[in-house]
Image (cartoon, rainbow, N blue to C red):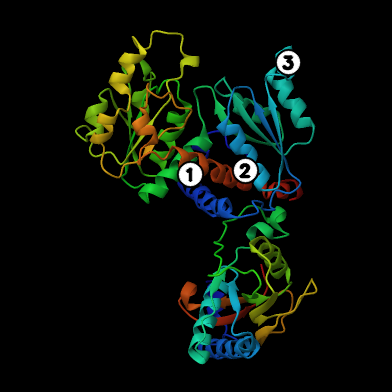
Amino acid sequence: MKHLLSVADLDRATALEILDTAARMNMLQDREVKKLPPLRGRTIVNLFFEDSTRTRSSFEIAGKWLSADVINVSAKGSSVSKGESLRDTALTVAAMGVDALVVRHSASGAAARIAGWVDCHVVNAGDGTHEHPTQALLDAYTLRQRLGDFEDRHVAIVGDITHSRVARSNVLLLHNLGARVTLVGPPTLLPSGVAGWPCDVSWDLDAVLSGKAGGDVDAVMMLRVQRERMSGGYFPSEREYAIGYGLSPERLDLLGEHAPVLHPGPMNRGLEISSAAADGDRSVVLSQVKAGVSVRMAVLFRLLAGSSAEVVL
Amino acid sequence: MPSRAQAAAPVLTAADVARVTDRIAHQIIENVARQRFDAVLMGIPTRGVPLAERLADRIRTFAGATIPVGSLDITLYRDDLRLRGARPIAQTREPDGGVDGRLVILVDDVLCSGRSCRAALDALTELGRPRAVQLAALVDRGHRELPIRADYVGKNLPTSPEQSVRVLLQEHDGEDAVYVLEDES
């Protein structure tokens, strides 16, 4: 595996191996000295053309804990704002001798394009409305921690599916791992072609959460309403959205006792998720963030640990 | 296990493995009894871990002393990681009471180049500062590439570099035996 551009790059065995490795990496969180040596002398550049707090810092920490040198390049304050093209920026950074580019871009397919131009490894850290593979892996990691396994588990993914790369990656990965996914959202926020995805689709959140449509739900993942990608008109008002699709305290009670609540963040409190749900016992939002570091360590380790072998052999 | 392993006669049978383990346990007891058994056994995965458990069990039987057992993954510290690429990582488990200020006895199945042991010493540094570190190996087959020696050796097996040594343990392989296999490829 040279790049991680889509969760479709991962077969079930590889995905599980990454989750296993992440579980081992997780022990580092409890150590006094948070440093492992395997990527010593490797250079990773976080090439972020879009705003990000958790993904970028999580990749940075993951790289540093594995002893790689990590540099952040963001579009603001870089040559991109002077009008440099994506290709020129990528080639320029890669020419400095980096071993991996971690790419976030607002255009779907950006990371895959860059992977075709440069020689180094490329990790997709979110491309437009397409995919966000490491987010799906960390969600799977969190679900595995809570549920034990994936076989026949039922996960509801709720909200703005159209603009969500997180939903897309999660549907593919969870399906691949043996879980069952139901997407829930208003018809305007369900992408065209969703019928072809390996999942069920519903407009009725209450029916899904209470198990009346599609059986008991083992976990629910709330998605952020991505106002920055909307040009208006997807729903009448935020209040109406919250009433129809927000995870209110009442809806929380419909869920099974042990079903965890996930959210990839950043959360719009009061819109897609109430504070009662975000801060309650079932919320695993901070576990997800913690898992993010371990999962990204596992991904970087897998891509980079042996990469010189490809050159030598 | 490869079928060619079963074809040849084992150099150590199940009874030999048991005897050798008992002897190492006695040697450890002799060594640590004076320090009131203030020692820990750290198995190097995969087969060093059950060996360490067995040694602790024998020491409990022979001397009535409990020596904590841990495991120490060395994958991330290997010097051939770049050449051989990413591989699954095994579990590191600190023994009860940690390693600080205690005698740590590393346990591995085969001692050869000494590179695993070097990696283990690095990995151990991350867990704390032991009073001293020793090495126990079921089989020492020579061909050292680093200035490392074992403090407890079950069996010295002079081999040629082309041969390989395969240790089988009940816990992983369903039987106890040690085989010498011709040609590594």
- Residue A74 in the figure: left or right of residue A267: right
Placement of B28 over or under A297, stated as above or below: below
Residue sitting at x 25%, y 24%: A204
Whether callout 3 and callout 1 share a subunit is answered: yes
Please name which of the two marks, 3 or 2, marks the residue nearer to the observer.
2
Q: Residues within 10 Å of mark 1 (few under 14, many from 20)?
A: few
Q: Secondary structure at mark 2?
A: helix
The number of numbered badges drawn on the structure is: 3
- Residue A10 drawn at (x, y percent): 51, 42
Q: Does residue B158 appear anywhere in the picture?
A: yes
Residue sitting at x 52%, y 88%: B18
Please name which of the two marks, 2 or 1, marks the residue nearer to the observer.
2
Whether callout 3 and callout 2 share a subunit is answered: yes
Disc nearer the start of the sequence (2/1): 1
Three-letter amino acid code at disc 2? Ala
List the residue tagged with mark 1. A11
Q: Nearer the viewer, residue A131 or B96?
A: B96
Residue sitting at x 51%, y 91%: B62
List the residue tagged with mark 3. A84
Q: Quadrant of residue B26?
A: bottom right
Please name which of the two marks, 3 or 1, marks the residue nearer to the observer.
3
